[in-house]
Image (spheres, rainbow, N blue to C red):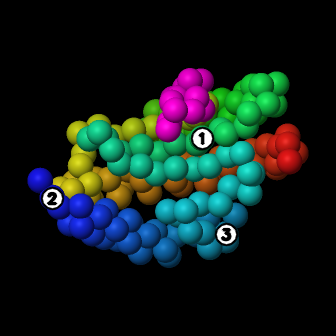
């Protein structure tokens, strides 16, 4: 077991390492992008990288609360997922009832099982997985962001 301070240091070190690894990688649009904290440009959609419960996850979270808008946006995201699945080495899944912090969200996601952020031997595998997932998302996002931006409610 690690102390809280040791665990926080290892998590911080992992994300710093991943960020440095991804820094020279341009986005599909040619722009520089902060891969760990990717800005989607759509208020109600977030790209999230996470490691918990012995798995790494790349997710697209849909935070829209208006049911009709949420359902329509999720349909567009599912089309994006189909495009990613046809061009990606990893399988993307859809979840219409993902619970996070006692809130039900919709998400697209892919995951890598049996990895632990506190085991540095797992880091290369996790970094490769996160890189692949974020590049998949970024490549698809170029085509779907304008449509989703028009749908968002302020």
Using the numbered discs, state the Cα–Cα distance from disc 3 to disc 2 in whole angstroms. Answer: 40 Å
Q: Nearer the viewer, mark 1 or mark 2?
A: 2
Q: Camera-side residue: 49 or 90? A: 49
Q: Position of residue 1 (x, y in %)?
A: 11, 53
Q: Which residue is mark 2?
A: 2
Where residue 131 sits: x, y (%)? Answer: 44, 57
Spatial CA span between label 3 and label 1: 24 Å
The residue to which callout 1 is attached is 61
| Up-down relation of residue 9 to residue 42 (above or below) | below
The magenta region covers 93-105
Would you name the residue on which mark 3 appears? 30
Label 1: state its secondary structure: strand
Asked if the stretch drawn in magenta spans residue 94, the answer is: yes
Q: Residue at x 58, y 29 (%)?
A: 104
Q: Residue furthest left?
A: 1
Report the residue at 26% width, 54% height from top: 117
Q: Main secondary structure of the magenta part?
A: strand
Distance from label 1 to label 2 (Cα)? 30 Å
Label 3 crowding class (10 Å Cα cut-off): few <14, some 14-19, many 20+?
few
- Answer with mark 1 or mark 2, whichever residue precedes in sequence: 2
**The residue tagged with tag 3: helix, strand or loop?**
loop
Which circle, 3 or 1, is nearer the viewer?
1
Decide which of 140, 59 is in the foreground and name it: 59
Front one among 46 and 147: 46
Q: Which of marks 2 and 3 precedes in the sequence?
A: 2
Q: Secondary structure at mark 2?
A: loop
Q: Give the quadrant of residue 138.
A: bottom right
Q: Given contact means CB atoms under 8 Å apart, are the residues at marks 3 and 1 in contact?
A: no
Contact (CB < 8 A) between labels 3 and 2?
no
């Amino acid at each position: 077991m690690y102390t809280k301070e040791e665990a926080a240091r290892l998590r911080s070190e992992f994300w710093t390492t991943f960020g440095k690894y991804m820094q020279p990688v341009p986005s599909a649009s040619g722009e520089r992008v902060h891969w760990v904290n990717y800005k989607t440009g759509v208020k109600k959609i977030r790209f999230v990288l996470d490691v918990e419960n012995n798995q790494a996850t790349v997710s697209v979270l849909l935070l829209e609360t208006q049911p009709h808008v949420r359902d329509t946006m999720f349909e567009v995201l599912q089309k994006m997922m189909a495009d990613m699945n046809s061009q990606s080495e990893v399988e993307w899944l859809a979840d219409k009832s993902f619970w996070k912090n006692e809130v039900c969200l919709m998400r697209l996601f892919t995951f890598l099982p049996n990895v632990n952020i506190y085991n540095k031997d797992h880091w290369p595998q996790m970094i490769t997985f996160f890189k692949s997932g974020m590049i998949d998302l970024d490549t698809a996002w170029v085509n779907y962001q304008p449509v989703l931006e028009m749908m968002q409610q302020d």
